[in-house]
Amino acid sequence: MGKSLYSNTNVNNEILRNSSDEGTSTQSLSATTISATTIYGNLVDSKYLQTTVTVTAADFLGTAPGDTVKVLIPPVGAGKYLRLNTLVGKFKNATVAYDTMPVLTVATELSPINNLISLVSLGTTEEIVSIAGNNVATGINGSIYLVYKISGSTPTVGDGDLIFEIKYEILDF
């Protein structure tokens, strides 16, 4: 019979439970701050963090061509970088189609990381609009963000959300 160990650690009022029996372990942790490093999202397993970010009509209507529409994952700190495992973008909740919009891309400081996204052609149809991954990395202290391409006019009417489900890890450089 194997040896069982159970421990609970309270970090910023969040409980991290570790248990092991014959080499198996499980972990559970919500977004919190550990050693002055903020973790955005939930610890999925011992390697990846997961977060969901919603980009709303207000974000689209209030941003000029060429500008960042919304930061999806903020910079992670000096000497660290992000490595993206998966990113899925879903267009949902539209009742009025956007009248015009520059194409969008998800990017890092180094390069775009997915295909161009055009919401105008969707009207009010719910759709998966973006899939990326394959361990794309940001620069040191980099972020992942949604940006308008430079050409095109920003929308004046429309609604609908672009919801990103992101799985990533923070690594030391």
Image (cartoon, rainbow, N blue to C red):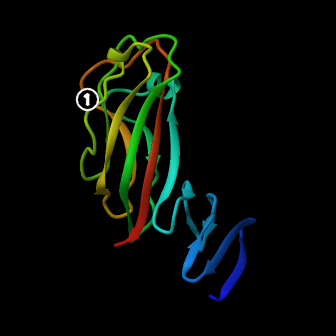
Residue plotted at (41% across, 36% down) = 89
Quarter-of-image position of residue 78: bottom left
Location of the C terminus (image quadrant):
bottom left
User: In x, y percent, where is residue 164?
Assistant: 45, 39
Location of the N terminus (image quadrant):
bottom right
User: In x, y percent, where is residue 111?
Assistant: 24, 48
Q: Nearer the viewer, residue 37 or 25?
A: 25
Q: Nearer the viewer, residue 162 or 66?
A: 162
Q: Nearer the viewer, residue 145 or 165?
A: 165
Q: For the residue labelled by badge 1, is the local secondary structure a helix, a strand or a loop?
A: loop
User: In x, y percent, where is residue 13?
Assistant: 75, 65
Tell me if residue 87 comes above or below residue 11 in the rendering: above
Tell me if residue 137 comes above or below residue 173 in the rendering: above
Tell me if residue 30 comes above or below residue 113 in the rendering: below
Residue plotted at (42% across, 16% down) = 125
Q: How many marks?
A: 1
Q: Is residue 172 left or right of residue 12?
A: left
Quarter-of-image position of residue 83: bottom left
Instruction: Determine which residue is flagged by label 1.
Output: 150
Residue plotted at (42% across, 28% down) = 63
Q: Nearer the viewer, residue 63 or 1?
A: 1
User: In x, y percent, where is residue 68?
Assistant: 38, 37
Residue plotted at (42% across, 57% down) = 168
Instruction: Tell me the kind of residue under disc 1.
Output: Ile
**Label 1, residues with CA under 10 Å away: few <14, some 14-19, many ≥20:** few
In the orientation shown, which residue stands out farthest toward the front? 1
